[in-house]
Image (cartoon, coloured by chain):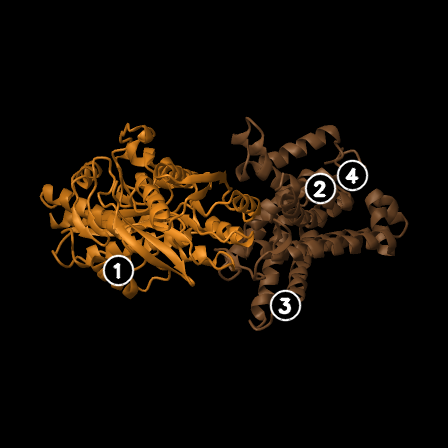
């Protein structure tokens, strides 16, 4: 018996190592089997990561990758699941849906992978969900906010229908984020005439549409709408239009590279009005996009500021101690929680099967995800019947000087 | 209609920027009938050259004083890369089938982008570019001219004037015209055509650097991908104006720039076309304009040669 388990162990380690080498990227320092603890064979479970690790959104992506790595290290150190060593394998999707789909296929083909954290972009998620569903593999996004991902395409008409049983998220949806932003802009910031711009991407259009509807419902006026193209840098045409529309605020659905430039160009065109956006613009890169000061610009982001949560102190400290090169950024806490949810689901699966991984581990992990509940970095982590987080906390941030300062944190109310 | 003057001012600034880059396409095409698709990357590299100079200079040097040095640094980098590209990538293929240099140009474009991405410090993200601070200049009533646009509106006409005089008056300039008309005969007349071709690439590179600085000032940032869209637009401008004609390139740029800003502003006011207006559609309208012009005047606005070789 002893002999056979050694053979299995060697085989598992070799295949694992081969798979990881083939995938190209792997973090140093995570669980190498050392056989200590329970004095015998350990199974290796891989938690995949898919995020934009290069390109303009890489500040977000690197934070996601590192935070998952930290969760895995913590799980191994605490021996969270007896007999299981966790690993991570991180793939770069460059925020491109096609690349995300290839990564999804790669992760699905690796039998050691029992759960994946990612992706960051809702558009990428759309291309990955189907692959994961077929493989029965759990995907937990720390950042996707588009409602259709969990509630189906007809969510706006009130027909909620969960399209993919394997998809979960620790980030809240744009239905909540967009409406929260509109409520803040109308009631607290007292802006009555907003100009709405989006970047024609899944996330941006969804968020901007929801914002506009709620803003109108509250009694505000939409001074105009326009769309810009991702990766362009010249938005002076739109900026002039915004100035001429007489709007007293701009709402932008999209990511920080374009948002920073748009905000600066609106101000340079002579309209001294704030720009507001969602979690995609809540990044230092928004302020440094170009030289113009951004004081007064606003962003909503999911959850409470990680720095201010008691539950997050350990995470922040651990992240610092691990010495990662990039900051954990907007989604760090959610990525840690997403990875931890997978760890918990694996734990439940192993415990229900007399301390071993069952043959249909992926299906069992997926089923266990629905029942996961623990106190995470960002608060209580659990998922509702659609796979959405039950956590509906949001924060409004404002640019003061050169940094984002949290202005107001609250739980969303209808 | 009250938006018209503002649209024209913004469009002019954008258009002269396109025009400066289009010069590079048109000069090279005029002489060797090659569409140098790597020209957008020459622009990008000029921008990084200028940024490097700015980072070398102490922060206390004001931007106005640093600008000439940045232009020089940017121009040196782009000219060096453009002439090296000619010497090592295009010259060995001069007698090869037409497809070979074209594909080389595309490959070169990707290679240059990735080189900057991999080796320029921190170029994986956008690098911020210095800007003139302060409010826009108010020309009249509601028309604003942004500070950073002043540079391109001054630099572009100066560059065009210098180039026009050079081509028309100087001995080398006339040799250039001769080479464009008939390279074989020009060589028989004792003109060193290789030198003329290098010169065409060099002038294109220098103009590209001016455009890169202008673009950096406008956007407040440069990145390794910026050359692609700029190059595509400038190529469109060159074709629109009549490829091979330097004044056509500038005219094409200005027409394209104004068409883009005007379509952003006006199309959606046309009844029934609200869905087709705004910033998201400006490229569509720019290319519709290109197609219409090419249908009516296949040689472009100022082109003389029939586009039989393009």
What residue do we see at 33% from left, 31% from top? A156
Q: Tell me: A247 left or right of A207.
A: right
Residue B149 or residue A85, whichever sits in front: B149
Do discs 4 and 1 belong to a common subunit?
Answer: no
Q: Element under label 4?
A: loop
On the image, which quarter does residue B82 sit in? bottom right
Compared with residue A32, is residue A200 higher up or lower down, i.e. above or below? Answer: above
Q: Nearer the viewer, mark 1 or mark 3?
A: 1
Q: Tell me: A25 left or right of B212.
A: left
Residue that mark 1 sits on:
A308
Residue A28 or residue B276, whichever sits in front: B276
Marks 4 and 1 sit apart, C-alpha to C-alpha, by 64 Å
Q: Residues within 10 Å of mark 4 (few under 14, many from 20)?
A: many
Disc ID at residue B66:
3
Do discs 4 and 2 belong to a common subunit?
Answer: yes
Compared with residue A197, is residue B121 higher up or lower down, i.e. above or below? Answer: below
Q: Tell me: B110 left or right of A50.
A: right
Residue that mark 4 sits on:
B302
Q: What color was chain B assigned in the picture? A: brown
Marks 2 and 1 sit apart, C-alpha to C-alpha, by 55 Å
**Quick check: can you spot residue A247?**
yes
Q: Position of residue B291 (x, y in %)?
A: 67, 31
Residue at mark 3: chain: B
Q: Mark 2 near mark 1, Cβ–Cβ under 8 Å?
A: no
Q: Tell me: A267 left or right of B15.
A: left
Q: Nearer the viewer, mark 4 or mark 1?
A: 1
Residue at mark 1: chain: A
Marks 3 and 2 sit apart, C-alpha to C-alpha, by 31 Å
What residue do we see at 42% from left, 56% from top? A296
Q: What color was chain A assigned in the picture? A: orange
Disc ID at residue B252:
2
């Amino acid at each position: 018996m002893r002999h056979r388990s050694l053979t299995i162990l060697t085989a598992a380690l070799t295949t694992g190592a081969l798979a990881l080498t083939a995938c190209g990227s792997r973090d140093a320092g995570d669980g190498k089997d050392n056989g200590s603890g329970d004095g015998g064979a350990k199974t290796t479970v891989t938690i995949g990561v898919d995020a934009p690790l290069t390109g303009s959104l890489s500040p977000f992506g690197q934070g996601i990758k590192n935070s998952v790595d930290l969760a895995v290290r913590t799980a191994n150190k605490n021996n969270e699941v007896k007999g299981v060593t966790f690993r991570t394998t991180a793939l770069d999707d460059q925020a491109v849906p096609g690349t995300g789909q290839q990564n999804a296929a790669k992760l699905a083909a690796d039998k050691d992978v029992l759960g994946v954290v990612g992706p960051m972009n809702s558009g990428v998620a759309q291309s990955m969900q189907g692959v994961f569903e077929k493989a029965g593999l759990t995907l937990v996004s720390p950042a996707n906010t588009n409602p259709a991902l969990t509630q189906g395409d007809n969510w706006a008409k009130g027909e909620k229908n969960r399209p993919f049983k394997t998809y979960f998220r620790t980030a809240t949806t744009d239905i909540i984020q967009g409406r929260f932003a509109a409520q803040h802009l109308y009631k607290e910031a007292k802006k009555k005439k907003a100009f709405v711009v989006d970047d024609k991407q899944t996330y941006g259009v969804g968020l901007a549409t929801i914002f506009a509807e709620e803003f109108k419902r509250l009694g505000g006026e939409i001074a105009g709408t326009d769309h810009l193209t991702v990766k362009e840098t010249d938005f002076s045409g739109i900026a002039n239009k915004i100035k001429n529309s007489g709007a007293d605020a701009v709402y932008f659905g999209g990511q920080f590279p374009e948002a920073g430039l748009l905000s600066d160009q609106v101000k340079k065109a002579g309209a001294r009005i704030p720009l507001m956006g969602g979690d995609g613009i809540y990044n230092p890169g928004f302020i440094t996009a170009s030289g113009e000061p951004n004081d007064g610009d606003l962003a909503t982001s999911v959850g409470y500021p990680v720095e201010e949560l008691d539950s997050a102190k350990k995470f922040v400290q651990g992240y610092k101690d691990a010495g990662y090169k990039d900051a954990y950024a907007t989604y760090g806490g959610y990525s840690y929680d997403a990875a931890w949810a997978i760890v918990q689901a694996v734990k439940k699966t192993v415990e229900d099967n007399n301390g071993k991984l069952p043959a249909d581990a992926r299906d069992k992990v997926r089923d266990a995800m629905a029942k996961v509940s623990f106190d995470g970095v960002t608060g209580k982590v659990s998922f509702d019947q659609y796979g959405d987080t039950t956590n509906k906390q949001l924060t409004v941030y404002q640019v003061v000087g050169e940094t984002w300062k949290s202005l107001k944190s609250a739980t969303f109310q209808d | 209609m009250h938006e018209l003057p503002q649209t024209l001012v913004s469009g002019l600034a954008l258009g002269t920027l396109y025009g400066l880059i289009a010069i590079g396409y048109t000069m090279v095409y005029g002489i060797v009938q090659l569409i140098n698709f790597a020209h957008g990357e020459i622009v990008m590299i000029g921008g990084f050259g200028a940024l490097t100079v700015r980072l070398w200079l102490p922060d206390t040097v004001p931007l106005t004083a640093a600008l000439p040095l940045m232009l020089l640094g940017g121009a040196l980098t782009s000219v060096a890369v453009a002439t090296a590209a000619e010497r090592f990538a295009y010259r060995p293929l001069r007698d090869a089938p037409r497809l070979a240099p074209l594909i080389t140009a595309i490959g070169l474009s990707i290679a240059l982008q990735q080189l900057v991405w991999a080796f320029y410090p921190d170029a994986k993200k956008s690098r911020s570019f210095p800007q003139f601070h302060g409010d826009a200049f108010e020309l009249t009533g509601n028309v604003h001219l942004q500070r950073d646009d002043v540079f391109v509106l001054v630099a572009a006409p100066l560059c065009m004037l210098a180039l026009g005089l050079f081509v028309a008056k100087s001995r080398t300039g006339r040799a250039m015209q001769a080479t464009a008309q008939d390279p074989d005969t020009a060589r028989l007349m004792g003109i060193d055509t290789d030198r003329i071709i290098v010169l065409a690439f060099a002038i294109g590179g220098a103009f590209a650097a001016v455009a890169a600085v202008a673009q950096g000032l406008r956007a407040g940032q440069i990145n390794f991908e910026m050359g692609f869209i700029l190059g595509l637009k400038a190529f469109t401008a060159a074709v629109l104006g009549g490829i091979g004609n330097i004044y056509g390139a500038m005219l094409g740029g200005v027409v394209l720039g104004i068409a883009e800003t005007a379509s952003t502003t006006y199309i959606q006011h046309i009844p029934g076309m609200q869905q087709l207006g705004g910033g998201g559609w400006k490229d569509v309208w720019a290319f519709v304009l290109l197609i219409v012009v090419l249908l009516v005047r296949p040689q472009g606005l100022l082109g003389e040669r029939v586009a039989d070789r393009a």
